[in-house]
Amino acid sequence: MVAALYSSVGRAGASGYLAAMLVVGLPAAMMRPAALLLNVGVATVASFKCIRAGAFSWRTLLPFALASVPMSFVGGGLVLPAEIYKPVIGAVLILAALRLLAGAREAEARPMPIPLALAAGGVIGLVSGLTGIGGGIFLMPLLLFSGWATPRVAAGVSAVFILLNSSAALLSQPVALSALPPVMPIWALCAIAGGWVGATYGSRALNPAWTRRGLAVVLLVAAARTLIV
């Protein structure tokens, strides 16, 4: 469900997976690699669909990716104690919910300052690696609110950005992958199937604005649980 809903609005779903894992009480050490692995599966599907449809721009992606991928690798190699990790995740979920509620404005693409794109990519990459999100939930609003990409291209760039960041963060923590539960392949298959359905049919059957609002409420509830408990 998370993968289908998120992919219908151009995301891979890491913040939703983290929210679900928080609600069911999964150990903090398992949450980050699990979310990243699910992200890779769904982002692969989304990237394939967007590139194939021509909704993508290497020129827009590269400045962000050049800084974010190495920083995501660095962040993935850092281990935060559970008492720090959970409040950080709570803050990230709140910010992600606010971004979803803000939606996106239509805009024609305009020139993008490369130094600013590199700086933003580095920050997003570090946060992505530390927390187990792909960063698309921050990159897409930035592209749209700044007018650096059209909504269609922003979705494709975000999908590939998520795939690169999530893969880099996973590569930096091979030991953490051994802590994943045996049921992980089933979770991955479900996420990939949901992502395919959401990317293909979700935007047609669901109102994107209401979908974003519903996801935002879920994230806020999970964030409250994290910060209170």
Image (tube, grey):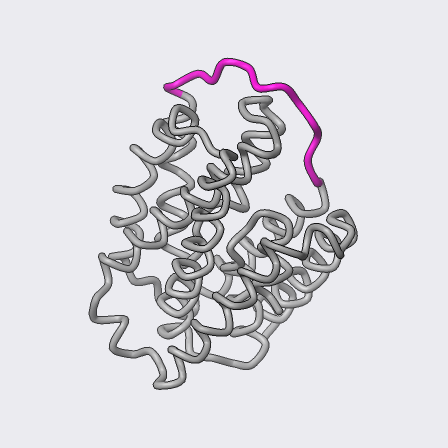
What residue do we see at 47% from left, 79% from top? 26
Q: In this view, does 220 lie to the left or right of 71?
A: right
Q: Is residue 151 magenta?
A: no
Q: Is residue 178 left or right of residue 96?
A: left
> Which residue is the extreme one toward the top?
111
- Of the pair 76 and 39, the residue shown nearer to us: 39
**First to last magenta residue range:** 103-115
- Of the pair 227 and 65, the residue shown nearer to us: 65
Q: In which quarter of the image is the C terminus?
A: bottom right
Residue 105 screen position, x and y as percent = 70, 30
Q: Is residue 106 magenta?
A: yes
Q: How many numbered marks does the figure carry?
A: 0
What residue do we see at 24% from left, 57% from top? 77
> Which residue is the extreme one toward the bottom?
182
Q: In this view, does 101 lie to the left or right of 199?
A: right
- Of the pair 83 and 58, the residue shown nearer to us: 58
Residue 159 screen position, x and y as percent = 47, 45
What residue do we see at 42% from left, 70% from top? 31
What residue do we see at 36% from left, 73% from top? 29
Residue 214 screen position, x and y as percent = 74, 59
Q: Quadrant of the N terminus?
A: bottom right
Q: Main secondary structure of the magenta part?
A: loop
Residue 44 screen position, x and y as percent = 41, 54
Picture quadrant where residue 175 is located: bottom left
Picture quadrant where residue 7 is located: bottom right
> Which residue is the extreme one toward the front?
52
